[in-house]
Image (tube, helix red, strand yellow):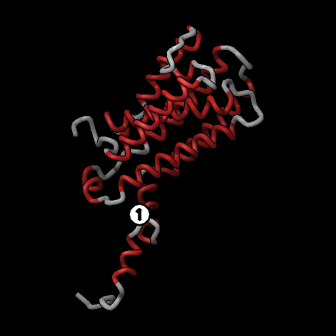
Amino acid sequence: MTAAGVDRAPGSRARGRGPAGPGGLRLAALHATSRRVLTCLLVLAAGAVALRTALHWLPRSGFYSRQIPLTIEAGAAAVIGVTTRSPFGEPERAAGYWLPLLRLGGSLALAVAAAGALAAGSAAAHLAGGTAGMVRDLAGFTGLALLTAVLAGGALAWIGPVAYLGITMPALGGGWTTPWTWPARPPHDHGAAICAALAFAAGLLLVTVRGARDSLRD
């Protein structure tokens, strides 16, 4: 035990623990590393390349012009959901004072990164539904992935968007009008946009407050 730093002003120590101080930046970096954010970003970049390649060969209209981009969007959302999993479980949840903010910031940042990557991948190419439709569908898929992470665990977050994608496929060719099958609706359908936004907001809120389950047993 030493007296080093006793004469330091209390405020100087508190500043290092704030979210914008050195301690907060280090905490954010550790949180991103534990969630494998870099791997997620690499997968999103690969998804953008895959979308660009697919759009080069896909027809400009028809079922497959919608199915392949939607599959890539659902995959991007699934990857975002998987990053919510904590490798430390309950100890991190009990000790992390800034954990809700880190969850919120991480999920939002990855959602924006996914939208930016897919928008870049589809730039100057014919994307059915356009960028607005892509952002709407990606937001809805991401919300479902986050909701699944809260209910079933981050490792199973992919189930939500993949299951919803399976429901959406018949809607693409069946002329369904319910806004809850938002990928099957036109890109400027307000009801579909509201439903996708509600799914995204609900997933983001719950994953911020509750976090992903460690397992189905907790």
Which quadrant of the structure image shows residue 5?
A: bottom left
Q: Work out which quarter of the rendered image holds the N terminus and state it.
A: bottom left
> Is 178 in front, or is 173?
178
Tell me: residue 90, above or below residue 175. below
x 31%, y 34%: residue? 151
Q: Residue furthest top?
A: 174
The crowd level at tag 1 (other Cα within 10 Å; few <14, some 14-19, many 20+) is: some
> Is 193 in front, or is 145?
193
- Give how far across and how far down residue 156 sits, in percent: 37, 34
Q: Work out which quarter of the rendered image holds the C terminus and state it.
A: top left
Tell me: residue 26, above or below residue 207. below
- Give how far across and how far down residue 108 sits, in percent: 50, 46
Tell me: residue 81, above or below residue 92. above
Q: Is residue 125 left or right of residue 150?
A: right
Q: Residue furthest right?
A: 124
x 64%, y 14%: residue? 63
- Give how far across and how far down residue 197 sits, in percent: 50, 33
Residue labelled with disc 1 = 27
x 59%, y 34%: residue? 135
Q: Is residue 95 left or right of residue 54?
A: left
The amino acid at mark 1 is: Leu
x 32%, y 60%: residue? 97
Circle 1: element type: helix
- Give how far across and how far down residue 163 sits, in percent: 43, 23
> Is 217 in front, or is 191?
191
Q: Is residue 42 left or right of residue 124?
A: left
Which quadrant of the structure image shows residue 48?
A: top right
